[in-house]
Amino acid sequence: MSTPGQSTATGEWSLRSSLVALLVVATLVTFTLIGIAILAYRVPAILAEDREHMRNEAVGLAHYFEQLIDSLEGRLGTLAALDMSMSPRQIQRFLDSVIAEGGFKAIYVLNPKGHVEYVALPEEAREARANVVGADLSRNPLLVSVRKFGRRAWSDRYLSALTGDATIGLAIPFDGYTLLGEVAPGFASEVLQAGTEDMIYPVLVVDRAGEYVVGRNLAEGDRLRNWAAELNGVSPGRMGDVRQIRFAGRPYDTGLARSDKLQWTFMVAYPTGMDNPRVRVTIVLVLVGFAGSILLALVLAPLWAVRMSAPLQDLIAQTRALTSGTFGGKVSRGRILEFNQLAADMESMATAIRERQGELEKSEERLLQSLQNVQQLNLLLEHRVELRTIDLERANRELSEAMETLKLAQGELVRNETLASLGNLVGGVAHELNTPIGNGVMAVSTMHDQVRTFRREMANGLRRSTLEAFVERVERGSEIAVRNLQRANELIASFKQVAVDQTSAQRRRFKLSEVIDEILMTLQPTLKRTPFRVERQIPDDLVLESYPGPLGQVLTNLLTNALTHGFEGRTYGLIRISAERHGDDQIVLRVADDGAGIQPDLFPRIFDPFVTSKLGRGGSGLGLHIVWNTVTVVLGGSITVNSTPEQGTEFRIILPLVAPRQPNNG
Amino acid sequence: MRIGFLGGLSGSVADLGESGRNGAQIAVEEINRSGGVNGRQVELIVRDDAQSPERAIAATNELIALHVEGIVGPMTSAMAEVALPIAQQAGIVLVSPTVTARKFFGLEDNLFLLMSSTREEARLSAEFHFNENGARHVVAIHDLKNRAYTESWLREFTVAFQDLGGEVFPVAYESGSEVNFGSVVRAALSKQPDAVLMIASAADAARFAQKVRERNPKILLFGSQWAATERLMELGGQSVEGMVLHNYFDRDSKAPELVRLRDIYTQRFLREPGFAGVAAYDATRILLMALARRQHGEPLQETLVTRGPFPGAEGEITFDRFGDNRRLSHVTVVRDGQFVTLR
């Protein structure tokens, strides 16, 4: 029985444990589902918000750049009002005043041939002026484009005519001249710094060809690479776009904006997926909630379970008391309706049990009395049975003695039967030998007569022709005698074997076909006198190590049975003997006739002793009993029979190829 | 699988580095689109040497630490001088598209060179200008900042030109923001030369040309391959017209691979690839192809030497046992703002 609060070894759970488990599992499942729902709803929303935010940031940055570029353009634009007929010194002064305002590292005035006529440089680089004045910038791509379109233009990435460094340039055409301003190298990075002060993720500005212009928080590899592939097809315009772009191998949601004026693309990146800080915070919150709910459930659930199961414990104790026969206990009441109902029902049940128990005790007394009566009757009965048993034992003894006598008689009869078959055998032998020996005798006596005749003729003088005739006759006669005596010899040898087998029950290795042939030969005299035929179909390769004598006896009995019972009163009949291999170590031997069949009333007892259809007409009734006995005991096989009245009978004998050894003849 | 690119991507030689990097990037993207090297995608890791030895050493070490299979670069001989010992020690192969200094040739080292040495180019230049242009007194302005290259070029040119019977006057300067191009040119022209040779970057050569033309509109200008980039025209304008230079590839070639590369490059980067872009494309493809052809356990140097030839944009490329390709550069002239191949 389980004790409260523990689960038993058989896997039963106490109410308290299952209540605790229920509460914990319910809490976890609920929070897991809520957590997944929160993540499934919030994470995409956060990412979408951040993407939108990045798009706005990129657009804002582009706008900010353009504003500052506008102010530079305005600054340079004032020079477009220069009157080139002014004195060179004056023009130079104007240029120098603009460059002093900052933002440009060089301002050139190019004449219609594209040669530098004036150049303004910051204070610290004035001595380089000589390098530049007179320079031919006619193939400068920015100048070429401004001349082609006749309006002001910002360069893409532009190689400084002063230093060969990459920078950006602004060209403004006026009066056939062109103003060319090269923006100071630090300008773009300063602007970017100011525009993206609080950003800790990659910010990148690239030119039309995807080449780095300026950036922040970038790995060196990202600064040095070309971004054309990532920006392929960014829609120009102020609305911007958002794409997922990899910086230093990690994906970022990147806001993209294009500045029409500069043909630059502004990229502002923010981590996406699990790298997104807000996503991480959300996940951490969900995990904290999850862990908190587990803790709370683990603390609260046992307390709740104890409270819930207390009335039940009381009920259990009360039930045990009832079982052990203690009545009148009161069950305490708790706050749970069903438990209270159960307690009330238990109390009324206890009362009912007590009443019934009283009644039971009374009827038990009555029962005890009648039981004593029955016991007396029993004693009487036993006495009578004893008397009868003595009578029965006597009768039984007499029966046993009679049985013994019968058994002796049966043994005698079996021996007689064996002798009878031996008699049959001798008869057969005599019959078979009759012909060759008779022939031999006749030949010899004929020869004897001729010898006498010859002697007589010899007294009258011996003629050559007479001698020749005599020799020929003697030769023929002796030939006949020798042939017949040899035949007799063969027969005797074969009968000798049969006789040895039959009388000694010798165990040997033999060919089944040979033994069957020998048996058939001994039966030949019997068969010859009948119209019945025997067909045999025995494969030559069936070799048994068994007892050929007993086997012959079995066959003789079965054949005799067929002739005497099966074909009685018939003018034709066919017995088929066949054998074949049965499994690895057995053969099956069939003896079938097409005779009258076995009477149905005899059929079930056919192998019992003293069963015969010719009771009182010469049948001993032991033939098939001996067959059964020999097959099962001596040969170690089994025999079955099938019979249909007026159709025939078939005996089926299964024999082992190697017969079990008989204990008495080893 | 990572390969590195090392080149100058800032400062006045950035055009060379940038073209090289773009060529390398196209080659890597092409191989990745066709399934990578033996099924592995290739990542190109770019580092800037800024033409400063310190930066080049740091950048090379960084690339080696990132386990690159090989490095395309460096783009100038001065950088090769510092990067090679580090790469040699780490067993990393450098395939340089543009390094030509004589001293790197004929050595069994980790540096594989696509271009023929300064000797071949300088001799070709000397013979061409002595025989075809009748130059006899040449003043050679050369940049000491890339001494490994410029001095090698100058020496080879001087030997060859003097052998022919000419005379060479060297004028050295060191590139940077303080250079006074006017005074260098003044010093050069004071030698009364009949031709001015500039062994300088495109940006510097363009500005020297400007200064020379101010004083002498007729004198023959010629330069080494280093200056043969599109920036020469951009910064030099009319003054570089007629200037004779050398080029890795024939700009008038109709070789289908080259035409295709120039199309892709121009469309993608909005400018011409230049010799550096084409050579870096070739170098990168060779490096990737060697990685693909390499047998298990074979050093990459051996693969490069024995498993050639490798396809180049303008023809096949084979390395001798020193890892040199010895390909003759073409002679080009600036005509109407374009490079035109003379031979």
Image (cartoon, coloured by chain):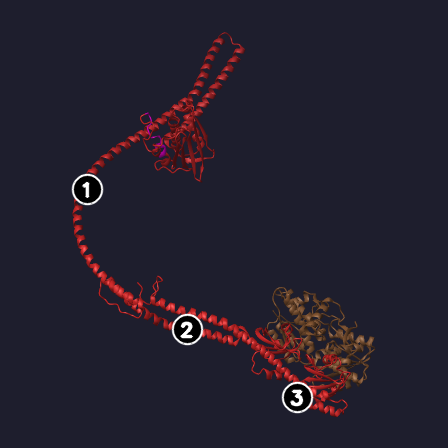
Chain colours: A red, B brown
Q: Which mark is residue B339?
A: none
- Label 1 secondary element: helix
Q: In this orientation, which residue lies closer to the viewer: B105 or A410?
A: A410
Q: Label 2 amino acid? A: Ser
Q: Label 1 amino acid? A: Val
Q: Which residues are magenta?
A: A617-629
Task: Give the residue displayed 57% in from the left and 74% down from the top.
Answer: A252
- Earlier along the polypeptide chain: callout 1 or callout 2? 2
Is B324 inside the magenta-drawn segment? no
In the visual, does B94 lie left or right of A403? right
Q: Label 3 amino acid? A: Gly
Q: CA distance from mark 3 to mark 2?
A: 62 Å
- Label 2 secondary element: helix
In the visual, does B292 lie left or right of B332? left
Q: Which residue is mark 2?
A: A293
Residue A481 is situated, as x and y percent measured from the top left of the image, at: 46, 19
The quarter of the picture where residue A545 lies is top left
Q: Is residue B249 visible?
A: yes
In this view, the mark in front (3 or 1): 3
Task: Give the residue displayed 51% in from the left and 8% down from the top.
Answer: A461
Q: Which residue is mark 3?
A: A102
- Earlier along the polypeptide chain: callout 3 or callout 1? 3
